[in-house]
Image (cartoon, rainbow, N blue to C red):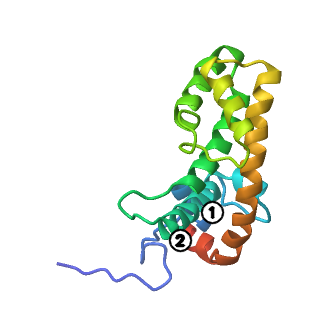
Amino acid sequence: MVETRLKMGSSNSKKKVKQKGLMTQCKEKLGDESPPSPPRNLYSTLKSSILTLEFKAFLRKLDLATSPDPSNPDTSRVTSLQFVLDVRELMNLPERERKEFVWRMGEVYFTVPGEGLVLDNDVLWTRCSDVCRARKTGSEDLKWLEKARDSSLKELDELHVEFLENRAPAQLSILCLL
């Protein structure tokens, strides 16, 4: 049996395995959404689904930490964020789908005072509850839900500052490398 020796550097000496680039690897992990730039404010966080999930996890930790009963945690901060996201979704829905969505929002956020969405303004909470129960979707009616959203955004904006301070700057880089 005759052995053939290959010279170093020849094209047959090594099989090159082509690796994917870092951006391709990130895209595979993150889907079509590109890695978000570092958030500067609440608006930029809510524009990115990745950052929104990260902010929601932060709020969940706060809710658990301040809950007097760990087996039945307070979720008011997470509920406020979800309400803001739901109002955004409502405004993007076609008119024919809004009535059902408004009714479902009422079931989640405005069933019993003091439960669901917690607002500082009881009159605003009652108006939102009435709009949802009646499945009203006129622009004047939806203004009540938008005012409740704005009230929730004010509360979330203060917490967002804390989120930014505690957010690990390298966390995004690690996400891509995983």
Report whether residue 99 is seen: yes
Examine the rendered structure and indicate whether residue 149 appears above or below residue 134.
below
Please indicate, yes or no, whether residue 38 appears anywhere in the rendered image: no
> Total number of numbered labels?
2
* Label 2 residue SS: helix
Mark 2 and mark 1: Cα distance apart in space:
10 Å
Badge 1 amino acid:
Met
Residue 138 vertical position relative to residue 118 in the rendered view, above or below = above
Residue behind mark 1: 23
Determine the residue positioned at 50% across, 82% down.
9
Viewer-proximal residue among 12 and 77: 77
Can you identify the residue that label 2 sits on? 177
Depth check: 136 or 45 in front? 136
Q: Quadrant of residue 92?
A: top right
> x, y (%) of residue 170?
62, 78
Q: Quadrant of the N terminus?
A: bottom left
Amino acid on which the number 2 mark rests in the picture: Leu
Determine the secondary structure under disc 1: helix
Where residue 19 sits in the image (x, y, percent)?
A: 51, 67
State if disc 1 and disc 2 touch (CB < 8 Å).
Answer: no
Residue ID at (70%, 77%) = 165
| Quadrant in which residue 154 is drawn | bottom right
> At which x and y percent is residue 20?
54, 64
> Which residue is painted at 72% across and 19% down in the image?
137
